[in-house]
Amino acid sequence: MPFDKSLDKSLFSESVEFESTKITVGVFSYNEGTPKLQISRENRNANGDVSFAKLGRMLKEEVEAVLPFMEKAKEFL
């Protein structure tokens, strides 16, 4: 069964921007299923082009900025 974007419901989403990246914390429910936390990263290069990347490791400043969003997101899980 392929992913169907129309079945993916966003319950919560907040983002924080840094110099060349944006991290978003969201809670999504697919096909009315169990809500799940998602953390994603968007990178911007010098030309302003945006690409999505695996979140991977985070700097301390990124963690400190994202933790309050994760606390808020818990209410939607």
Image: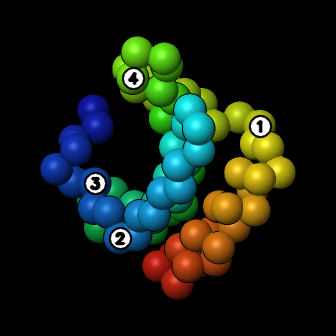
For marks 3 and 1, give the one nearer the viewer.
Answer: 1
Q: Secondary structure at mark 4?
A: loop
- Name the residue carrying label 2: 11
Q: Give the class, few, some or many, for how many residues have Cα within 10 Å of label 3's Cα (few <14, many ≥20).
A: some
- Name the residue carrying label 1: 57
Q: Please name whichever residue, 35 or 14, is drawn nearer the observer in this view of the structure.
A: 14
Task: Give the distance between the C-alpha atoms of the residues marked 3 and 1, in whole angstroms.
Answer: 26 Å
> Residue type at mark 2?
Leu
> Residue type at mark 4?
Gly
Which numbered tag is attached to residue 48? 4
Point out the tag, 4 or 1, that comes first from the N-terminus: 4
Q: Is residue 26 left or right of residue 1?
A: right
Which numbered tag is attached to residue 8? 3
Point out the tag, 2 or 1, that comes first from the N-terminus: 2
Circle 2/circle 4 CB separation < 8 Å: no
Point out the tag, 4 or 3, that comes first from the N-terminus: 3
Q: Secondary structure at mark 3?
A: strand
